Structures are given as C-alpha cells and as structure tokens.
Image: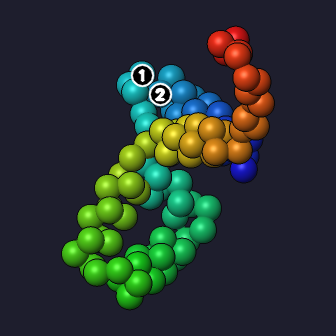
C-alpha cells in the first residue's frame, strides 16, 4: 500500500508540476478535486456515512479539512505512515549498541 500511495503521489506531483508550468504559478490540486474526478459521488457518500457513524459536528470539519489539503501531500503522508508501519524491525542482540 505504501508503494501505491508513493506512486499516486508522484503521478499527482507530475500533473501539478505540469499545470504549474502551464500557468506560470504554483498549482496544487486539492484532494476533493482529485477524488471527484476519479470517483464522483463517493466523497458525498463518505460524508453521509461519517455523519451517521460519528457526530456531524466532528465529522464535517475533519472531512472538509482533509479534502482541502493538496493531493500530493495526502498521498505522501499516507505513504510515509504506511511504510513505517510495514517495515521490518531489526533483531537486537544483547550487548549491541545499535548500528
């Protein structure tokens, strides 16, 4: 999953860089725009489900905040978290000082 998120980050980064070059201004696509382009209606369905599963006072601001973030940052953060969670730990031996 971390590799998938990293690949998505690179793809969206290239798209944003291309748009930035074309407009001569920094352009970062919000997650909401990318989400709606890929799966129209699913973001609304998630919002409705969150309203039922959690209190709307809590769910609405969180969803609005996250979907307003740049897509490249969301996928980069997910890739980092998933890579850290999925990494293998080194075996430590008694008396070892690391390294």
C-beta proximity under 8 Å, tags 2 and 1: yes
- Lateral position of residue 87 relative to residue 54, left or right: right
| Image position, residue 77 (x, y; %) | 52, 40
Image quarter (top left, top right, bottom left or bottom right) of the C terminus? top right
| Residue drawn at x 48%, y 76% as measured from the top left | 46
Residue that numbered label 2 is attached to? 20
Q: Is residue 24 above or below residue 34?
A: above
| Image position, residue 27 (x, y; %) | 42, 33
| Residue drawn at x 40%, y 56% as measured from the top left | 67
Q: Is residue 95 above or below residue 12?
A: above
- The answer to whether one can see residue 68 in this image is yes
User: Residue most toward the left?
Assistant: 57
Picture quadrant where residue 7 is located: top right
| Image position, residue 4 (x, y; %) | 73, 46
Find numbered disc 1 in the image and state the secondary structure of the residue it sits on: loop
Colouring convention used in this rendered image of the protein: rainbow
Front-most of residues 83 and 88: 88
Find numbered disc 2 in the image and state the secondary structure of the residue it sits on: helix
Residue that numbered label 1 is attached to? 24
- The tag on residue 49 is none
- The answer to whether one can see residue 48 in this image is no
| Residue drawn at x 38%, y 88% as measured from the top left | 52
| Residue drawn at x 54%, y 27% as measured from the top left | 17
- Lateral position of residue 32 relative to residue 7, left or right: left
Q: Is residue 18 above or below residue 79?
A: above
Label 1 CA crowd tier, 10 Å (few <14, some 14–19, many 20+): few
Picture quadrant where residue 83 is located: top right
Residues at marks 2 and 1, CA–CA distance in whole angstroms? 6 Å
Front-most of residues 66 and 1: 1
Label 2 CA crowd tier, 10 Å (few <14, some 14–19, many 20+): some
User: Residue most toward the bottom?
Assistant: 52
């Amino acid at each position: 999953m971390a590799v998938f998120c990293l690949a998505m980050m690179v793809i969206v980064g290239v798209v944003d860089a291309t748009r930035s070059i074309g407009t001569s201004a920094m352009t970062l696509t919000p997650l909401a725009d990318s989400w709606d382009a890929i799966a129209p209606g699913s973001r609304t369905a998630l919002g409705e489900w969150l309203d039922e599963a959690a209190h709307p006072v809590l769910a609405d601001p969180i969803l609005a905040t996250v979907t307003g973030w740049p897509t490249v940052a969301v996928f980069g953060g997910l890739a980092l978290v998933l890579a850290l969670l999925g990494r293998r730990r080194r075996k430590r031996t008694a008396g070892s000082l690391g390294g």
